[in-house]
Image (spheres, grey):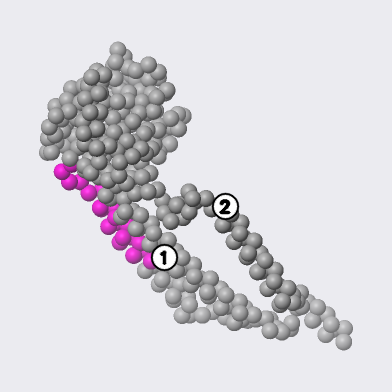
Amino acid sequence: MDRERGSSVGLQVPKISGAPARRFLRVALLGVTMLVLAGCSAADEHQIRNLAMPDRITEQGPYTYELWKWAWVAAMVTGVIVWGLIFYVVVKFRRRSDDEVPRQTRYNLPLEVFYTIAPVLMCIVFFFHTVRVQDIQTELTTPDVTVEVTGQQWSWTFNHGVGEQNPDATGQPDDYAYDSYVYTSGDGSEIPTLVLPVDQRIQFNLRSPDVIHDFGVPSFLIKMDVIPGRLNQLQVTPTVEGDYVGKCYELCGVYHSRMLFKVKVVSEAEYQQYISDLADAGQTAEQPIIGGANVTTQTGLDESQSQEGSEE
């Protein structure tokens, strides 16, 4: 009798009445639902609809968003399958007796084959669509406007061409797209503004005179490294006028957090007026300001041309 009592005590688990457990589950679920709904503002709802992605303001942006959206769908389908199998096992193979001990060496060959093949197929599909979207986002065609961008420690210089563009220009030294330029540059006390015309294909020629930076605008849904000694090129077509923000996405030094810039997408007439305003302010150059081996200031200008607060 004592032996039987001892064996049963070792295998027994606490029993919970079904009705109180279900009641507790309903109350907890209701409480969590009310808490989530109470915390959803209009901005939160907008973020949920966008799957936490920024609004798309370029012709290329929706491709990135679609890739992101279907990745979420694939993740949710995978989660439902895994959760379903877990719940199935919990119910199907639950303990039915206090004295029951399940077999510890059983395996399911079809399930293991499925868990091997399914992830491989998912990786292949993800790889295919990622490469497709990447090819679309990095495609280079004849641009309508070319902007020479210099990322330097720790701000940005934007060079806008004046006059007719040479569509065959490579962007290398002595082969720029325009005969003259106007520029704007940030410094330690001023965040620069990048002005772009709407519905025009913009090419950014990206350079750095010092360390690796990264040019990115969240609403573009794309970013690209700015690497010393290398010309990287990126094209986007803004489709929505408005004010946006950009920043450096690469840790580039102690004042990396200063590398912010504003983006203003405007009409063609406003863009041309902006170019004229920069010229009237004397911010002109025969070639774009791109820094180089002899750079002595934050903007890559000579000492006599440096802006107040820009010298490091």
Q: Position of residue 5 (x, y in %)?
A: 84, 82
162 displayed left or right of 30: left
Report which residue position mark 2 lands on: 39
Q: How far apart are marks 1 and 2 (CA)?
A: 27 Å
Q: Identify the amino acid type marked 2.
A: Gly
Residue 17 x/y as whole percent: 74, 77
Q: Residue at x 37, y 16 (%)?
A: 308
In the depicted structure, whether residue 199 falls above or below residue 304: below
Name above or below for residue 212 compared with residue 40. Answer: above
Residue 261 visible to an observer of this rendering: yes
Q: Residue 169 carries which label?
A: none
Please give the range of residues in magenta: 122-143
Q: Residue furthest top?
A: 304
Name the disc covering residue 74, or none.
1
Q: Return the residue nearer the eye: 40 or 246.
A: 40
Disc 1 secondary structure class: helix
Tell me which residue sits at (54%, 79%) in the image: 107
Query: Does label 1 or label 2 sit earlier along the sequence?
Result: 2
The secondary structure type at the circle numbered 2 is: loop
Camera-nearest label, 1 or 2: 2
Question: Quadrant of residue 217 in the image?
Answer: top left
